Each structure stands twice: as C-alpha cells, then as structure tokens.
Image: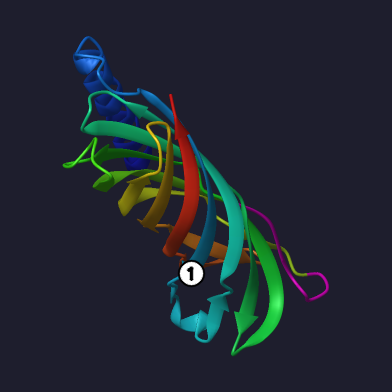
Amino acid sequence: MKRCVVAVLGMSLVMALGFATIAQADDYKSFGVRLRGIYVVPSEDVDHQLNGVTLSDTLIPEIDFEYFFTKNVSTELIAGVTRHDIKADGNTIGSTWLLPPTLTVKWHPLAGGTFSPYLGVGINGTMPYHTHLNVDNTRTSIHNSIGWAAQAGLDYKVTESVFLNLDYKFFSADTKIVINGTAMHLDINPNLFGFGVGYRF
C-alpha cells in the first residue's frame, strides 16, 4: 500500500510540474519519440535459500516517449519487455518475462546544444509474468514491484529534429519469488545500457 501511495504522489508531482510550466515559451520542440537497443543486466540480491540463483542478461528493443515541459525539463515514459533465463550455479533452470514501465523526470542543463547531457529520477513498476521452472509440478511466480529509477544520458543533435542517444538507467525492483507457496526474497535491480535514435517535433 505504501508503495502505491508513493507512486501516486510521484505521478501527481510530474503532472503538477507540467501544468505549472505548460504556458512557458515554446522556442523548443516539445515532443519526442526514441527507439533504443537496450542491454539489460540484472544485479540480483537473493534470499539465502536462493544462493547461486541469477537472471541472465538480455538485449531488447525499447521505445520511449518524451515531453518537454520547458527547454531544460522533460519527462520520459519507456516501454519494453525483457525475457530472462533463471539460472542456478550457471545452469538454466527456468525463465521469466518482465514488463517494466518507467516514468522519469529529466533535467537537461545544456539543452539546445549539440551535446546535451541529462539526469533523471522517477518511478518504475516491474511486472513479471510467464515465470516457470523446469521441474514438473512446480508452481512458480514472481511478485510485482514498484520502486525508484535513476537515469543519466547524452543526446547528440544530428539535425534540429534528429538526434542520437546514449542512456543508462537503474531500477530498484524489490520483489519475491514464490515456489510451491514459499516466498523468498529476490531483488532483480536491473541496469539498462541503451543506444538509440530519436525524433523531436
């Protein structure tokens, strides 16, 4: 319940910021869409009963949408799906899919330049599904989680509308895996390394 309240308050803050700044000068392009290739590297923290259990790295396509409240402040919503092998001591014992919608607020201190670095913070929701272990009669699931997200990156302006992007994100995904009714601590905590191209209008 507490996490849901934090998520609602965070989204309310983003909306309030938008309404407060929407009337400012429009000497910048407000909307952007970007396509990235993302390399996802989980940094697991597991229950002692799961010693040796890890999730595999994966490479995925990701699309995100960005809106600039001002020249220097934007919000970004990302959409993507990842699949990970569940491994024990290096051997694959199952798999899971993760849907991690994430909303960040970004600050661009050098907006408008050829090189435009940025920092961001926000909210991540991690929703695992199709989790299974390769053992007969084993019921397995991973809980959903809501946590914080951190972001840093760089836009390189090719034209006034087209830009290249390097991006790093960290998601705090504190969750549990349930095996035959027994819940065990499993923090996924993925690191996301991205490279892509975007269009702003």
Residue at x-position 52% and y-position 58%: 38
In magenta, the rendered stretch is 128-137
Which residue in the rendered view is the most extreme toward the left?
A: 109
Q: Looking at the magenta stretch, what is its main secondary structure? A: strand
Task: Judge whether 89 appears above or below 138 on screen.
Answer: below
Image quadrant occupied by the C terminus: top left
The image shows residue 189 at horizontal and vertical percentages of 41, 63
Q: Secondary structure at mark 1?
A: strand
Q: How is the image coloured?
A: rainbow
Residue at x-position 39% and y-position 55%: 166
The image shows residue 153 at horizontal and vertical percentages of 32, 53
Residue at x-position 59% and y-position 90%: 89
Image quadrant occupied by the N terminus: top left
On the question of residue 98 being in view, the answer is no
In the picture of the structure, the residue carrying the numbered disc 1 is: 41
Position of 200 with respect to 12 (left or right) is right
Quadrant of the rendered image containing residue 113: top left
Is residue 151 part of the magenta span, yes or no? no
Quadrant of the rendered image containing residue 68: top left
Task: Judge whether 191 appears above or below 103 on screen.
Answer: below
Name the amino acid, label 1. Val
On the question of residue 133 being in view, the answer is yes
